[in-house]
Amino acid sequence: MFDYLLENHSLYALFKPHWIILFCIIIFFYIKNVIKSPLYDVTNNQILYFFTAIITLLFIKATPLDVVGTHYLFSVHTLQMSFAYFIAIPLLILSIPTDILRQYVWHYQTKFFVNLLSHPWLSLATFNGLLSIYFIPTVFKLVQANLFISIIVQIILFISAIFMWFVIINPLPEIKGLSFILRAFYIFLASVILLPIGFFYVVVQSAHFPMYIDVAGELITGFTAVYDQQAAGGILKITQLASYSYALLIIAIKWGRLEEEREGQVDEENIRYVRGVVIHLDENNKKR
């Protein structure tokens, strides 16, 4: 396979040095301005999240995988998008110290826009809706026919994915986000919205992408355009469900820890002492 790619594409196209340089610059700034900075408390987990995200992005953008996804296999293109939106982005958000988010994301000049773009139901509909529309065959053909439109669409999807994961992760305690149970419901809805398009590609029995039909079987013998589309649907759903399931697990663990901390604690604000008798007030009596 690699020999075939090397015969038909240059080394620059296969390994994208500009992406490698860009990610090396990002790594340099993260190490210098975050890890080694005395201003921020960076945990080992955050460092691990950052480098895992960068390696994932390098894998999908600066290897022959990008050429394969662009010219030969729709399933590989879907894999690239799935890894970027459901693995790399949440890891990047988790890798950023809270103080940096307060300094550069949540201050008086950006609060309005962050609140607007990260509105739970708006971000849910924006990312998952746009991604579903993007994978509709007619829309996909239109986007891929123009490089400029393709770049703009990728940027919009990337940004909308950031705000969707911002709602799920809720990295800033001072932002009044969704409760644990609402975040779980939010994740459920996100998976449901993408279900139809993923299911469509899994059960489809006819090829819908001429750009991939013409080269079907060139890289993998016997791997038809229909099999390619079915694999794409499976990859999209598996990656999405795995990512959302892990997010649900983390939310459940945090929720459980919070409930354990509350057990046995006395709510002193709702207690009154009357002649040696302890009275617990409910919220209605407290307001009176």
Image (cartoon, helix red, strand yellow):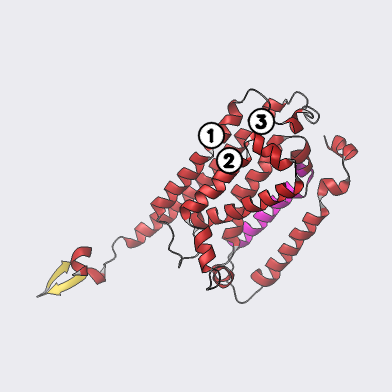
Q: Position of residue 257 (x, y in %)?
A: 40, 57
Q: CA distance from mark 2 to mark 1?
A: 8 Å
Depth order, front residue of 200/240:
200
Around disc 3, counting alpha carbons within 10 Å, would you say few (fewer than 14), some (14 to 19), or many (20 or more)?
Answer: many
Image position, residue 156 (x, y; %): 63, 52
Find disc 2 in the rendering and name its residue. 132
Q: What residue type is disc 2 on?
A: Ser
Q: Amino acid at mark 3?
A: Gln
- Answer yes or no: is residue 111 visible: yes
Quadrant for the N terminus in the image: top right
Q: Give the magenta range.
A: 44-66
- What secondary structure is found at the residue carrying circle 1? helix
Label for residue 99? Answer: none
Instruction: Check contact, mark 2 vs mark 1: CB within 8 A.
Output: yes
Residue 88 seen in this snapshot: no
The residue drawn where x is 66% and y is 53% is 155
For disc 1, the marked residue is 196
Give the spatial CA distance, label 1 vs label 3. Answer: 14 Å
Do the residues bearing badges 2 and 3 touch, measured as CB atoms within 8 Å? Answer: no
Magenta stretch mostly in which secondary structure? Answer: helix
For the residue carrying disc 2, how many other residues have a C-alpha within 10 Å: few (<14), some (14-19), or many (20+)? Answer: some
- Can you say whether 77 is above or below 116 in the image? above
Determine the residue positioned at 60% across, 29% down.
202
Which residue sits furthest right? 7
Q: Mark 1 touching mark 3, by CB under 8 A? A: no
Q: Position of residue 239 (x, y in %)?
A: 59, 41
Marks 2 and 3, the one that precedes in the sequence: 2
Q: Secondary structure at mark 2?
A: helix
Kind of residue at disc 1: Pro
Residue at 46% in and 51% down: 121
Residue of label 3: 229
